[in-house]
Amino acid sequence: MAAAIAALTIIVTHPLPWEASWALPWDLGDPVFGAFVLGWDASRMSHGFIGVWSAPFYFPLPDTLALAEHLLGIAVFTAPIVWLTGNPVLAHNVAFLASYVLSGVGMYMLARSLWGRRDAAFLAALAFAFAPHRAMHFSHLQVLMSGWMPLSLWGLHRYFATGSRRFLAVFAGAFAVLGLSNGYFLYFFSVPVALIVTCELARAAAAGPGPRRMRLPWRAIADLAVAAMAILAAIAPAALAYTRVRRAYGFRRAVDEMAGFSAAWSDYLRIPSGSWLWSSVLDVGAGERTLFPGLTIVVLAGIAALTVRRAAWSARMRRPTGWSWHLGIYSFILGLAVWLSAGPSTPGPYAWLLRTLPGFDGLRVPARFIVIVALALSVLGSAGAAWLLGRLRSRTAVAVAALLGAGLVLEGYSPMHPVPFRHDQPVRAQLNNWIRNGPPGAVLELPIVGPAVEAFTVAYQYNTLRHGRPIVNGYSGYGYGLQDFLGGAGSPLTEPDAISGMLDGLRSIGVRYVVVHQSLFSDRPELGWRDPKDLVEALDHAVGRRGRQFNDAVAWLLDPPRHRMPVQESLLSPVRLSESMLTASSLPGHLRYVYDGDVGTNWVSAGPQAGGEWVRLSFGDEIDVGRLVLMTSPYGLPSYARGMDVESETPDGSRLTLYSGSFLPRLIEGLASGRAGAPAVIDLPSNRSRALWVRQTGRSDRWVWAIHELEVFRRRTP
């Protein structure tokens, strides 16, 4: 059976099996990212998992691997491939192909244990392994790794049938590996598991001995508690990392964002792009909302529904034990999964799960419940097939099973078009060697874009496996403020006068290398430079020496950051701001927004930055102002001050400059912190100020100067 599934996998994924060492399925976005993560996991596993969460992107943020799927449940099996071949692309593709076999084998074992027929179980294996929804997830390796679900349920059902703890260990082990392969499945698969466990415990309690009945099966409860603790122990390191990230950055998915990735009922009649059998009949869906489950399996599941009544069974047909019981459970799972796939915008249990389950609000694609739908349909469909084939003569049953199997595979077939991706990146080899052999430090690669996935961004990540340095760039399920700023509107990269300040900021956070890939700018005016040679010249001027040429790339090694005197944080205390303390060159009535605690509100200058804008803070008494903190928001980043002076107004009315120069270094440091508001911290030398002037000294023809939040700290005498 496994060999048959493997052979079919090779056929339906042709030509990927023959190109597995140098091509990837679907595109060069998520598959390259998946290969990168598997390569990173393998490298950390060889060092005892030390530093596994500090993946080398979004520098200098910590726990960056927890900003995406960590794939550790897959990497434990693919790491030897990476160690032996040095080829994460091959490891990714082996896992991709193995996911079909795992899904088929797991479902075969589950269906056979429930219904007792090999032919029906094989049809269930085909239905689950080659379900139509898999084609829309060719680029999502973690979603394809759903085969642990039926294997886990097989162990769970066998445990309740036999009481053997070996089967419970299979359940717990498969569940743990599933959860370490896909964070979505850790939550989504818990729904059918919780339902089955509840029903089985209730049935066991109802069947208890004695006149009072309803005696709780304490042994089973204790066993399941131990299994649950084992699963939690296995996923605990990952759960702690994700919890740290959520607390540090406040990551939550907005309900509106979830709604955009929720299923509409019509989506169950939409097919993936390239679907071979139904392309002339059904409409192609958008994104992950292509949820057509296939007609064959739905018809077979419908037949199963008709077999609940004993009248549907002839005298010569043996009705498996627990037939109606299991049909009822999986029918409920099917209905519940379809309901949950509609997400929070539909009244029902999804909103309740959002309120009660920690971390559930970090999942943005409720439509991925299609995997649970396919699981339940495969089980129910195999029941229908078992009943149907059991009514037929042997030869007829074989022919009908073959026709049904062909229909199941063809309904899920979408031609595979692998995309070349040379894992060794020969064009970059010399550049990677230069970075690897240079001084320690991070890398900024240009062009740079915001959170949208670009093939070159993911390739930058992949190349960290080659040169061994972290990069500012990156792609994950969440954006990074510094990358969004450098690659977005108002980026200092588009303003030659700002590049020097930008480089100072990059150096201050530990960036030592800047690389410009000139060919990637072609026909991309939105990246800020119509001719990348102009950017190269601007960087040459700002760095003070010419960059080094590597094929189409030009690279610079930046000087180490300047030493800055440490600040005694314990001596700083906040100054409470009020409306009477503040005035400005324009719109003074809006200054209340700079201390209202909301980075979404702000004070802005009356027009584009002209160099004469100012905000004055009056303290009344003479104080030593030790620090200013200016905050912004994702919507206000382009409105940063192009230049800044901070002046102390002394009791005699004279002014002393405390800070003068580019604001960019402090802004970049704030963005690199990952903290809300990207706090730009300006530490000031000792002073005696009755008032403080914050002046904007730069120019911009397009952008105003905005302050979203302003914090002032006084320095106490030690």
Image (spheres, helix red, strand yellow):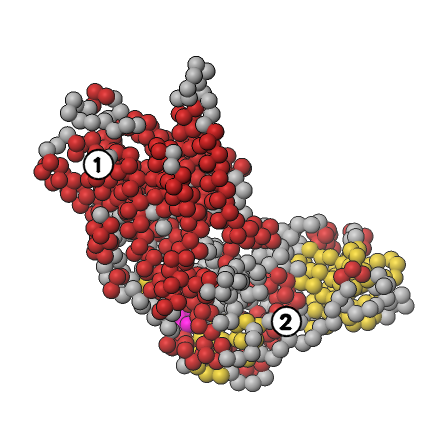
Q: Where residue 447 sits: x, y (%)?
A: 47, 70
Q: Residue at the spot x=62%, y=55% of the render? A: 676
- Which class describes the residues within 10 Å of circle 2: few (<14), some (14-19), or many (20+)? some
Question: Of 591 and 207, which appears nearest the observer?
Answer: 207
Q: Going by the image, does 440 lie left or right of 301?
A: right
Give the amino acid type for the residue marked by disc 2 in the picture: Ser
Can you identify the residue that label 1 sits on?
117
Q: Going by the image, does 494 lie left or right of 31?
A: right
Give the amino acid type for the residue marked by disc 1 in the picture: Arg
Q: Secondary structure at mark 1?
A: loop
Q: Residue furthest right?
A: 652
Location of residue 442 with respect to 45 vertically, above or below = below
Can you identify the residue that label 2 sits on?
508
Q: Where residue 84 sits: x, y (%)?
A: 36, 68
Q: Is residue 524 magenta?
A: yes
The quarter of the rendered structure image containing the C terminus is bottom right
Q: Where residue 93 sits: x, y (%)?
A: 32, 60
Q: Quadrant of residue 456?
A: bottom left
What residue range appears in magenta? 520-525
Q: Is residue 293 magenta?
A: no
Residue 375, visible in the rendered structure: yes
Q: Residue at the spot x=55%, y=51% of the render? A: 240
